[in-house]
Amino acid sequence: MTSEPQTRAASADPRTLRRSDFPEMQRVSTRWSDNDMYGHLNNAVYYELFDSVLNAWLIRETGIDETVSEAMGVVAESSCRFYSELAYPQPIDVGVRVERVGTKSVTFAFGLFAEGSDDIAAHGLWAQVYVDRTGRHTVALPDVVREVVERNSAAQP
């Protein structure tokens, strides 16, 4: 999936994004084991945060049980840009926004912020494609997912 985000805010330099640009914000605690030998969060931890916060939000908003639903969202593409270090024991606020809604996929953006800071420390993009659980063939977004992501889309006025 190579589609570029469709909104002005989404195509702007991600370093200019602030907390208020992310309608969903969750605070997460960091763990001792999240730090690497350089004394900051290991890059893989950022993707764990994206995954955990996004799925908590989707489950809460849609009521879907991802472990048994007929369709499931799988990551087709992801990226992360790092702007400043984050480290244990620093609490982190993870923002989520919907960048693009397609027929079978959704692109989400993430902003990671140090507690008390409005400067984005990292920006992630995550393209999630929906597939049927048994055959793994692409399917249309489930209606309840489409309703939630369209309601929370950055393209909405």
Image: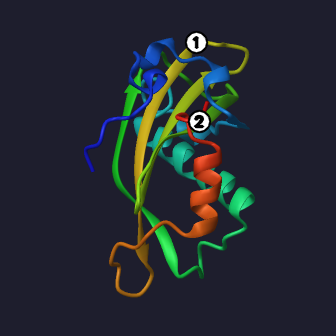
- Determine whether 102 is above or below 154 in the image: below
How far apart are the two marked residues, 1 and 2, measured between alpha carbons? 24 Å
Label 2, secondary structure: give it.
loop
Judging by the rendered image, the residue that carries numbered circle 1 is: 119
- Marks 1 and 2 in Cβ contact (< 8 Å): no
Mark 1 residue crowding within 10 angstroms, few (<14) / some (14–19) / many (20+): some
Q: Position of residue 93 (x, y in %)?
A: 67, 30
Q: Position of residue 112 (x, y in %)?
A: 57, 28
Residue at (67, 70) in percent of width and height: 64
Disc 1 marks which amino acid? Asp
Nearer the observer, 117 or 143: 143
Query: Residue reaching furthest bottom?
Result: 134
Q: Which mark is residue 156?
A: 2
Nearer the observer, 27 or 54: 54
Side (left or right) of 108 relative to 118: left
Q: Position of residue 99 (x, y in %)?
A: 48, 38
- Determine whether 8 is above or below 34 in the image: above
Label 1, secondary structure: give it.
loop
Residue at (61, 30) in percent of width and height: 157
Query: Residue reaching furthest front?
Result: 157
Mark 2 residue crowding within 10 angstroms, few (<14) / some (14–19) / many (20+): few
Q: Position of residue 113 (x, y in %)?
A: 61, 23
The quarter of the displayed image where residue 134 is located: bottom left
Side (left or right) of 96 relative to 116: left
Nearer the observer, 90 or 39: 90
- Determine whether 21 is above or below 124 in the image: above
Q: Which mark is residue 139?
A: none
- Determine whether 49 is above or below 122 in the image: below
Q: Earlier in the sequence, mark 1 or mark 2?
A: 1
